[in-house]
Image (cartoon, grey):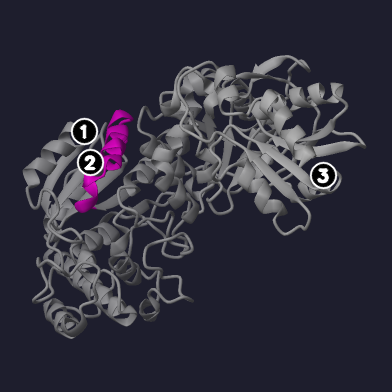
Amino acid sequence: MAYQSLTEQRASDLRDVANKIRIHSVTCTSAANSGHPTSSASMAEICSVLFFQYLKIDPNFVRHPSSDRLVLSKGHACPGLYGALVEAGVIPEEHLKTLRKFDSDLEGHPTPRQSYIDVATGSLGQGLSIAAGMAYNAKYYDKSSYRVYCILGDGETAEGSVWEAMSFASYYKLDNLCIILDINRLGQSEAAMLGHNMEVYRKRCDAFGTNAIVVDGHDVEVLNKAFHDAANCKGQPTTLICKTYKGKGFPGVEDLENWHGKPLGAKADISIEACKKLIKNPNVKLTMQPFTDDAPTVNFPKVTLSAPPNYEFGSKFASRKAYGNALVSIGKSYERIVALDGDTKNSTFSLTYKNAFPDRYVECFIAEQNLVGVAIGLGTRHRNIVFVSTFAAFFTRAFDQIRMGAISQTEVNFVGSHAGCSIGEDGPSQMALEDFACFRTVPHAVCFYPSDAVSCERAIELAANYRGITFTRTSRPETPVIYKKDEVFEIGKGKCVRSSDSDKVTVVGAGVTLQEAMIAADALQKDGINIRVIDPFCLKPIDKELLIASAKETNGKIITVEDHYPEGGLGEAVAGAVSEEKGIQVRRMAVNDVPRSGKKDELMKEFKIDSTAIIAAVKSFIAY
């Protein structure tokens, strides 16, 4: 499509809107006495041209499935975004003065509490991965015409996750993605790393496979042409590298340090007047472009396994392999199940799903922060049910993305394999020993720890239907199948797998340690000592009622045994659950030091989480 230059009137109107956005950012941050007017000012023309020349959104239904997406990765500049939304008719102007107030939706950084925001941003370097996930969904799953835009600040390009995302976007030829770098030169405490060295930015963006265009970020005509070129670029995403000035248009503030994150104070009125003088038509009102309603309707059904788990009772099977089988089973029931992995698919067994449904699998390679961000993007606006797998230890690298995902109200399901010292010879760098400590802190997250293949498949089935974050820990060692295929599992409900009328102690184990607890129970029984063995199935929410009832029937004594560090795992979950009950004692067995390479049995013996250690702990507790 041939480019048509802006008319003189249209260019004037766009400049007027940009200056109104600046005024809005000063007004709202002054009312809040906090916020980021200078970071908003640098992107005013970008927002003006994007919103009123290219962004296709219905102001009355911003999250329409077919509308364009905008991710403000530099979330601190939300006063500028809110100002643009005022000009678009999405937010009433008087609402701006409620910025950062407790009873206002206009939070200090964007969150989906606002009906016009898809994801939370503000922890810098994360928005582009999410935008890439949205663009991937648009191109390969929705097969829709909507486009995705992401505005980043120059400071956040120091984050490696930005380049992970750019590499992903170019690899998958996401030509429906427009990356916008607001190069305003200044960071929070000093100048950004590259200042205004635009050629270095261009070379880097070009090297990562994007169509890199350097522009004057305050020239509406140049911006308009650049957005046009981006829309017509095929086979690769476009990066608009916009040279701008922080605090643009604010006298005594523009391009000066020490104004980051500060309201303008005494300079507010002067700055507002300076912007007003540049506005030719104070009453200018522009409208946004209409979109084509071509995204498919997506409704999440109740997802079920296509067939019950099919494992011989008593046979040995690794839960990580059961994860792959479960994905295929639910994938047969519902076509919008999407699986992602970070080049560990032959270990996590997401490869099983890829082999069955190659088009529903996304390889994100060894870039876990981007892996999580892409997953969040794929799940926005309820377009897909998303499962993400890698070694559980590697999710810690992306914990900030997961934490922000909770704020974004994401519904991503995380599955971590190779948990605990029981993985053996690979050594401590591969052993997840803090994974539950991380995921249990995530608001409203459900944490599953299946102990056999049947319970693993049922955990994945439950996760697919949960509207929020889930984490499922799978194990590398093969463990016996202890449940029949028709066993019913529920979120927050555990199982009593050994009991008698004369149990002396309750032992709670999970995964490999549940098997050790059952071996210990058999050995102790020969010595005339009966114990109760509990499989929690869920560590969050944990079955408080089952634990308390079992403790009261076993002399108020509970032993927990886990292949996890003592902090944040099974032991603390159980102790917390029974902490308000009188007469219950909890003794915890866990991996209490950094492990080393070795055989599974050697390591479990060394850290006293095997059946021999459990037997000794039970006898000691009884004698206490």
The secondary structure type at the circle numbered 1 is loop
SS assignment for the magenta stretch, majority: helix
Residue shown at 16% from the left, 35% from the top: 206
Q: Residue 519 shows which numbered tag?
A: none
The amino acid beneath tag 3 is: Ser
Q: Are marks 3 and 2 in contact (CB under 8 Å)?
A: no
* Residue closer to the observer: 297 or 290: 297
Residue shown at 39% from the left, 62% from the top: 110
The quarter of the displayed image where residue 571 is located: top right
The secondary structure type at the circle numbered 2 is strand
Q: Nearer the viewer, mark 1 or mark 2?
A: 1
The secondary structure type at the circle numbered 3 is helix
Name the residue tied to disc 3: 550
Q: Viewed as shown, does residue 373 lie left or right of 34?
A: right
> For the residues marked 3 and 1, what is the alpha-carbon distance in whole angstroms?
58 Å
> For the residues marked 3 and 2, what is the alpha-carbon distance in whole angstroms?
60 Å
Name the residue tied to disc 1: 208
**Precedes in sequence: disc 3 or disc 2:** 2
Q: Viewed as shown, does residue 609 lie left or right of 278?
A: right
Specify the farthest residue to the right.
501
Asked whether residue 208 is in view, the answer is yes
> For the residues marked 1 and 2, what is the alpha-carbon distance in whole angstroms?
11 Å
Name the residue tied to disc 2: 238
Indicate the position of residue 469 as horizontal and vertical percent values: 55, 46
Q: Nearer the viewer, mark 3 or mark 2?
A: 3
Residues drawn in magenta: 153-174
The amino acid beneath tag 2 is: Thr
315 shown above or below 294: above
